[in-house]
Image (cartoon, rainbow, N blue to C red):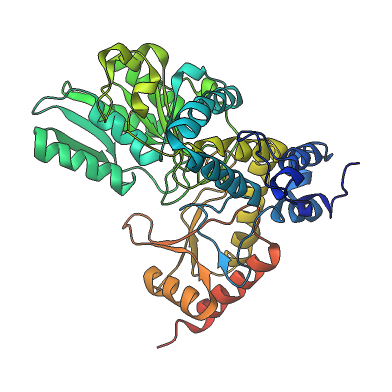
Amino acid sequence: MMPNRRQFLGSMAVPAAAAAGLPLLPTRLSAAAAEIADELGNWSGTPGQIARDEDFWVEVARAFTVDRSLINLNNGGVSPSPRWVQEAMKRHLDYSNEAPTYTMWQILEPQRETVRARLAREWGVDAEEIALTRNASEGLQILQHGFDLEPGDEVLTTTQDYGRMITTFRQRERRDGIVLKQIRIPVPAEDPAEIVRLFEEAITPRTRMILCCHMINLTGQILPVKELTALGRRHGIPVLVDGAHALAHFEFDLGELDVDFYATSLHKWLFAPHGTGLLYVRRERIPEVWPLTAAPESRDGDIRKFEEIGTHPAANYLAIAEALTFHQGMGGARKDARMVYLRDYWADRLLQHDRVRLHTSRKPGFACGLANVQIDGVDPGALNQYLWNEHRIIAVGIGHEECTGSRITPSVYTTLEELDRFGDVMEHVIRHGLPA
């Protein structure tokens, strides 16, 4: 019998076999995860209607074991996982530990292929084009270091790209003598053609690589990566897409984007175990990219060459399956709509004040749940210290000169009451300033 809306997310009892000390199939989806996916999937209503249905999101929130004595508005950094995702990972770890050279290498490790296939199916690409990595940074560094470059060769990106990726190119400057070129783009950027034009104007005969964000971590800006990839193809330049904040945050099909290179973290918006990521490389382009860690020549054309990192746990990657089931139960379009609804919920209130500026587009398709807000005259670093020290609200201070402010990223478990409390504190600062 299917549990009701209030009950089914609480039905997380350990299976009887485990309680009795009997072995479990280490990759079996828990009954609770399957039931939740089924229950959420059967909830009626359009994405817009579901986004405002607090009963639905109460059920979703019950999947998480978050600390409600604080308010976490930095889910863009790394997100908590649902309880059964954590339980699955722990179960796999326990099984691995029984006899790792057998249980981990012979039994669990091959099950990565199922996870690979499910991720590929969900986002519309071939399983032979997906590598499982530890995070977006690792995937991007595979690509940034994976192409042969000569002194004087240029790589092109924006001034708003992620700091670690800029640092990676800076190291290649010092080591290999390449040249990093950075362009400025508008904040917010609401004209895709202008973005493509700015990149194209910066291309020279020495340009060998382009890096662009799908969603910029500073502001939540969504860039036209399909058009930028097409631009790169016209000029014979590989375009590396930083999708760290995009996958499972808003609705899109990776295959339809028609990109060649795409890296993302799965521990952000898919709610997978911490330290899991995905690297997509179009099948015919795999041979031209060197892996970051050496792989045998026989794997030159195999996506798995990017996973050659030595001994590593299988558990983290297998538990991605549980996170994916949860995501499918919510539905990508409904999750997308909820994230926009939460952003607008707090932003509409704060934007009633003249001193508040939003460095994030409100137009559909140009941003989602991640937003950057600024109170004129208030230092974002000091504001975020105040939010945490006095009110236990976690946010991120952005000191970038083009988009100074606070990055706010609620999630599917965030309640409206928590956003009301955040709004109360921000309005107090607007009216009275920060304490001396």
Residue 16 higher or lower than 106, as above or below: below
Q: Nearer the viewer, residue 427 or 88?
A: 88
Residue 147 higher or lower than 163, as above or below: above
Residue 5 higher or lower than 431, as above or below: above
Q: Nearer the viewer, residue 380 or 351?
A: 380
Where residue 241 sits: x, y (%)?
39, 31
Q: Quadrant of residue 413?
A: bottom right
Where residue 422 sits: x, y (%)?
59, 70
- 352 lies left or right of 372: right
Can you see residue 320?
yes
Q: Residue at the far right: name it.
A: 1
Where residue 299 sits: x, y (%)?
32, 15
Q: Nearer the viewer, residue 63 or 100?
A: 100
**Residue drawn at x 81%, y 41% as measured from the top left:** 39
Q: Quadrant of residue 171?
A: top left
- 284 lies left or right of 48: left
**Residue drawn at x 48%, y 48% as measured from the top left:** 274
Quarter of the rendering occupied by the N terminus: top right
- 318 lies left or right of 33: left
Q: How many marks?
A: 0
Q: Quadrant of residue 170?
A: top left
Quarter of the rendering occupied by the C terminus: bottom left
- 205 lies left or right of 81: left
Where residue 68 sits: x, y (%)?
63, 68
**Residue drawn at x 42%, y 44% as measured from the top left:** 216
Can you see residue 266?
no
